[in-house]
Amino acid sequence: MAHIIETRGLARSFGTGTKAVEAVRGVDLAVADGQVFGFLGPNGAGKTTTLRMLVTLLPPTAGEARVVGHDLRTEPIEVRRRIGYVAQGFSSASGMTGRGELEMQGRLYGMDARTARDRAREVLEQLDLADAADRPARTWSGGMRRRLDVAMGIVHRPALLFLDEPTTGLDPQARAGLWQEITALRGSGTTVFLTTHYLDEADALCDRLAIIDHGRIVAEGTPDELKQRIAGDVVTIGVPDRTDAVLALVVRQPFVREVTRDEHLVRAYVDKGESALPALLRLLDGEGLAPDTLSLARPSLDDVFLRQTGRSLRDAA
Amino acid sequence: MSLLRDTWLQFRRAMWLTLHNPVWVVVGLTQPILYLVLFGPLLNSVSGDGLTPGQAFDIYVPGLMVQLAVFGAAFVGFGLIDEMREGVIERMRVTPSSRLALLLGRAGRDVLILVAQASLLALVAIPFGLSVSLEGLVVVMALLVLMGLLMASISYALALKLRNEDAFAPLLMTVTLPLLLLSGVLLPLTLAPDWLQTIASINPLSHAVDAARALFNGRFGDPSVVPGVVLMAVLALGGVLIGRRAFERMVA
């Protein structure tokens, strides 16, 4: 199976007639098996609505989708068997123990009592929850309850795991811990589809990204591709007393798209900073120009987001 | 995935949560006894028309049981609103497990609690002079099960629709109070003026109360019994279908 999620023209509107609101207006997605796929968008862009359609909670009003090889409309139960879903916010009852919830979740996926018990123990250990397993969830920290949500999402070893803003509201340590779990899941072959408001999260975790705005996909690609499409990388060279010579040299190079000067600093805009930097360094050396400072900067995903949606992701969150 | 298995899983989980909340267990079980001890003695004063205190209890206790069923089961939706807020319902709706089981497991717990409360009530009422046949009690319990299933299903359906306590609480009070007053649970409606009896006869609960009273007094052949039970069975089935739809349709 090349693509674990494939959608064509997936759409959802709420209400009817003149009051109808088109939340999602035809989304085409292809998510390859084994990836961590990030789904970004400002609030109200259609992010959660798309996710809720993909996990069978919301029937689409138009379009088609196959999720883990099964048609979303005609075989929702088959889809449910093969996916895990971790919603925004907690999903465990505060009165239940972590172990109780996990065993129940396993049984809901058809495991017998013994299998569910063994599997719960395994997942509790995997997510470092074994010590607290028999205490009610209300006594757990936010980070632990979030890990329990993830545990319930993977108890049946789904091929595809949906995470809706998995680290929102977590402290930095809990967040780092969850990142590790997500990376480990990917390592074990699970495809992860996640939404997030944090660009560093998207950058650190995701193999590919899609940005949705006003119900449509406005950009898609690897984080690096998206950043390059916007501006390219910037190499900044500082040779205080011979700035003019540097400028003259840099401007002649075919791989440099654009050059700007800021007093003693020369900025070269290039497609691939990682290969342009050593090349420029060699050229400068050949001319006997020894830089005081030399730096490489890449556009951030925030620049990408701003360019695509007109809003900063941080403001949108 | 069989419906029976999934219902059992949901029932077990719901029951576990209820039993691990000791406050609820105490309140739930003392409530019927409070009614009996604090309201029952008043019946001695209204039983002047040749009724012995025991006969007054034969009339009052079945009414009290219906009241338990209506009030107890009508309010179960509050628990479901909590579960929705905790994200539990949505999580379970993404599993391949039956959605009807989400309803039936919870309603099953509610009905079992209702039967326990009603049994305790009957037991405590015996020293006060209640006389009831075992057969009569069993059939009344069956009637209560149907009534509890109806009220719990409707309560869950409304909770799924309204999603918050602020809308749910006033609606419940508006519906349940007239429903109870017009069912003759406190005193038989034969004491009521004609216009009140006419309105009450539209209330399905009044027929259930009539049937329960007849059964308590061992009048199995009473004309109120069969219509009362059949009516409740049909309504309970309708309630379950409405509840199932609500669990399947829930959109947020």
Image (spheres, coloured by chain):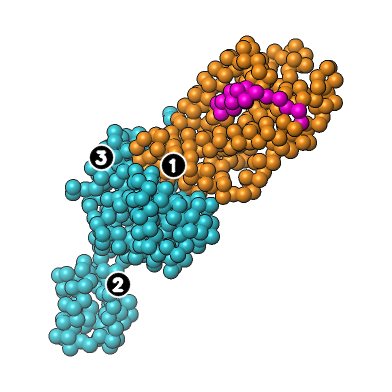
Chain colours: A cyan, B orange
Amino acid under disc 3: His
How packed mark 3 is, by other alpha carbons closer than 10 Å (few <14, some 14-19, many 20 or more), is some
Q: Which residues are magenta?
A: B128-147
Residue denoted by label 3: A70
User: Residue B19, image x and y in percent?
Assistant: 57, 47
Residue, x 71% and y 37% (percent of image)? B33
Based on the displayed image, in which of its 4 quarters is residue A243 positioned? bottom left
Residue denoted by label 2: A297
Q: Circle 3 — which element?
A: strand
Judged by depth in the image, the label closer to the viewer, 3 or 2, is 3
Please indicate, yes or no, whether residue A30 appears anywhere in the rendered image. no
Q: Circle 1 — which element?
A: helix
Q: Is residue A24 left or right of residue B34?
A: left
Amino acid under disc 2: Ala
Based on the displayed image, in which of its 4 quarters is residue B95 positioned? top left
Answer yes or no: are tags 1 and 3 on the same subunit.
Answer: no
Based on the displayed image, in which of its 4 quarters is residue B195 positioned? top right
Please indicate, yes or no, whether residue A154 appears anywhere in the rendered image. yes
Quadrant showing the C terminus of chain A: bottom left
Residue denoted by label 1: B9
